[in-house]
Image (cartoon, rainbow, N blue to C red):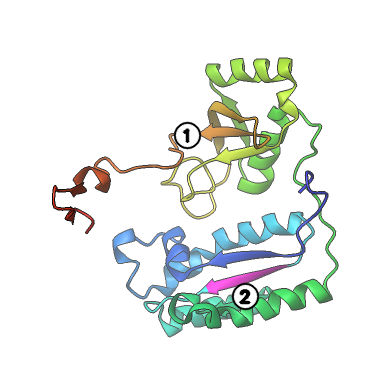
Amino acid sequence: MPQLGKAPDAIVIVATIRALKLHGGALKTNLAQEDVTALEAGFANLTKHIETVQQYGVPFVVAINRFSGDSDAELTALENWCKANNVNYSLTEVWEKGGAGGLDLAAKVVEAIETTTSTFRPIYEANQPLEEKILAIVQKVYGGSGVEFTTKARKQLIEFKQHGWDQYPVCMAKTQYSLSDDATRVGRPTDFIITIREFVPKMGAGFIVALTGDVMTMPGLPKHPAALDMDVDNSGRISGLF
């Protein structure tokens, strides 16, 4: 964190059986069913996240976030993959056991910090132009091949340079469902282009938000927000909460 003059001591990569099966080609409606084949196909996605973290030069631990619907066969397959690839991991059960379910993870994070030297390396340098920072993120973090800027985004880049804002760090607003900006491209897609449709400068916080694809920033309300059904009558009775 350049502003703080500090670097992270360790990184935790959280992985779930359901997410890996989805990235392995399983249908969302079938994620509750045991599917070791889809799970193993999804390891490619986890591999990319591990490779990304390794670029930072910081020790890491993969937290296998266990849920009640995960089968023993699936958990065993993931644990065996971690062991075969020398990946430091912890089976966490915070969802079911609360804080007690994360004690092993905490211990392994502390151990990683104490036994591994952290040589933090940022993905990009602060003095790089905004376009180069974004390209570095796309190629090094997402595994894409390039970046396209809409006409609006390019006009904003010119304005940012005039104001000296292109020296700010970047916050990428992108779908969480894919390494690309297309939520349907699961797994580990390659040779894709990230489209920057516009920028939102956050001068108070000191960074530039790059909006990609059709992503919606928070609060991200549904088409019919629950608040529309909430009411308080004259007697003080509240309705529509559930």
Q: Hey, which residue is sitting farthest front in the picture?
A: 235
Q: Eyeballing the image, is 39 above or below 187?
A: below
User: In the image, 235: left or right of 213?
Assistant: left
Query: Seen in the image, is 211 located left or right of residue 51?
Result: left
The amino acid at mark 2 is: Cys
Taking depth in this image into account, of 138 and 231 the one nearest to the observer is 231
Q: Is residue 61 magenta?
A: yes
Q: Is residue 35 magenta?
A: no
The residue located at (48%, 44%) in the rendering is 175
* Residue 66: % across, % down: 47, 76
* Residue to which mark 2 is pinned: 82
Magenta stretch secondary structure, dominant: strand
- Residue assigned mark 1: 213
Q: Residue at x 79, y 59 (%)?
A: 57
Q: Nearer the viewer, mark 2 or mark 1?
A: 1
What residue span does the magenta drawing correspond to?
60-64
Q: Dividing the image into 4 quarters, which one contains the C terminus?
A: bottom left
In x, y percent, where is residue 161? 72, 19
Residue 168 left/right relative to 153: right
Which residue is painted at 70% across and 39% down in the image? 136
Give the left or right position of residue 60, taking residue 40 as reference: right
